[in-house]
Image (cartoon, rainbow, N blue to C red):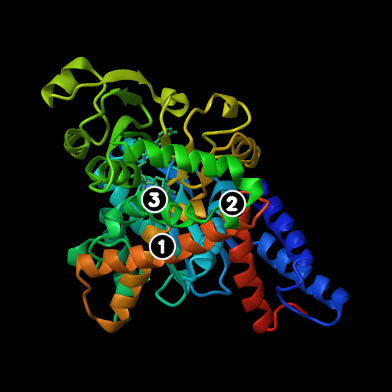
Amino acid sequence: MDRSQTKVLIEEVIKDLKQNNEFLEMDDLEERNKTLESAGEILKTTDKIIKSYIRVSRDGGKIERIPAYRVQHNNISGFYKGGIRFSEDVDESEVENLAILMTLKNALHGLPFGGAKGGVDINPRDYTDRELNLISKKYVQRFALNLGPTQDIPAPDLGTNERIIDWMVGEYKTIHPGQAYSGSFTGKSVENNGAKGRREATGIGTFLSYFYLLNEWFPEKRKDSEIRNEARSSQWETLEKLHTKFNEADPVDVAVQGFGNVGGVAALEAYNNAAAKHRVAAVSDQFVTLRHPEGLNVEKLLSYTRKHNRLPDTREQLQEYKIEAEVKAAKDILTMDVDVMIFAAVEDQVTKENMKDIQADVLVEGANAPVSVEADLYLQEQGKIIIPDILANAGGVHVSYLEWKQSRVTEMYSKEEILEEMGAQMRSTLKQVFGEYFLSSEHTMRFTCYSIALRRLTSLLYKHGKLF
Ligand code: NAD
């Protein structure tokens, strides 16, 4: 789902809100329409796009100038917040799209942050530690004026991690001596005032978004057939089928695309789930898919990946860790016959080109924007359930909020407190979205999420007097 699709969806939701007279009640209908259109215009455009070039001297002596971005989409609901990614696919359009998604995600979950995103156009695997350290420090130097605990607070994303964030905080501190620096970034290591559980939070929250639906929300609602929404009857059937499956001790088959920070943890959540049996039938990274119809040993795969920074893909590598798996091409995972597909890699994985080949019943977007708008609608018509990114992958930003808050009160929360708070906050948003989607909405779950987020953002813009 790219930037133009995100903007079109914002426009469609604003149109829909015009028909919903319970929202933003006003006597003058023309005035109300103008107010809503004005909110749409603000949210379809971006506050600030900063592009710069980072100069790096490579270990071999060569000098490179690398494009780097910070995009601040909107801060009506709080300080700008969003990750920094290191990836060869980074460009202005991608970073802007991800910044818009952050504004919507924070608004949907009621977090006191706006939306931003950063990116550096490199493949981090091609750079040495010294070069990555230099790039991280220069990123902070370039964008220093725009970052800070009460301005714009970055975090890790694709291709970055707590080590890179620690380097960035170190540089921020050097540039701003004597100033509060701990809240300037989240996703720091625990030793460097990071929050316990931040690394695992997005993966745990992603799995929770699916498991809460099947194991908590659905069992409670299925007793009352009166409340069902006809438009969602095939989705109810899908839930019924899956629920029966794991209640009869027949494991639910899960596939996870991407085996990094988000995917590795989501796979482990499925593997260790105590409440219902899951089988992790396939996992993939950018190089390979590993499959085992009786279930992969996720713990062994994680120990291999921790050491080698990628999944094993030769017979010798698999044997060294006693891993049983069939080796397939990276893309093969998308069309496998499983019940649940968790996306935890990159954008645009399911589009009109391959949507007809998707077999999973539930698609969970741990990654940002893996399913296009056309595919989302088509798959919904096939009775499938698509849990969208801004709903599913917010565990990380929930914990980032606690990390930022902890830096202001100088009090450390325990890992249990953090994950319990994150789970409670996620459940509350999940309950609201599932309630609207399954019981009354005629749209996709993504549309429902955008609608809740845009209602909050529009109300705030209105109350701040920005819509005249
Ligand atoms: P990561 O760098 O730790 O892991 C990414 C994984 O995806 C790796 O296994 C990598 O091999 C694989 N991958 C990369 N490019 C690929 C490609 N072209 N095709 C298939 N696989 C590919 O990244 P992460 O932090 O786990 O982030 C994964 C996704 O989750 C991203 O879309 C990111 O924006 C989103 N996300 C991350 C967080 C977070 O807290 N880290 C929060 C919200 C959303």
The amino acid pointed to by label 1 is Arg
Q: Tell me, for residue 446, which label it has, or none.
A: 2
Label 3, label 2: how far apart the Cα atoms are: 15 Å
Element class at badge 2:
helix
The amino acid pointed to by label 3 is Thr
Q: Tell me, for residue 427, which label it has, or none.
A: 1
Label 2: few (<14), some or many (≥20) within 10 Å?
many
- Residue 249: x and y in percent read 28, 36
Q: Are marks 2 and 1 in contact (CB under 8 Å)?
A: no
**Residue at the (34%, 58%) spot, across then down:** 137
Is residue 277 or residue 221 the one in the foreground?
Answer: 221
Q: Is residue 224 left or right of residue 2?
A: left
**Residue at the (35%, 41%) spot, across then down:** 124
Q: Tell me if residue 81 comes above or below residue 131 in the rendering.
A: below
Is residue 361 or residue 409 the one in the foreground?
Answer: 361
Q: Is residue 391 left or right of residue 451?
A: left
Mark 3 or mark 1: whose residue is earlier in sequence: 3
Give the mark count.
3
Q: Are marks 3 and 1 in contact (CB under 8 Å)?
A: no
Mark 3 or mark 2: whose residue is earlier in sequence: 3
The amino acid pointed to by label 2 is Arg
Q: Tell me, for residue 306, which label it has, or none.
A: none
Residue 242 picture quarter: top left
Q: Is residue 170 visible?
A: no
Residue labelled with disc 3: 206
Element class at badge 1:
helix
Is residue 426 or residue 370 the one in the foreground?
Answer: 426
Q: Quadrant of the C terminus?
A: bottom right
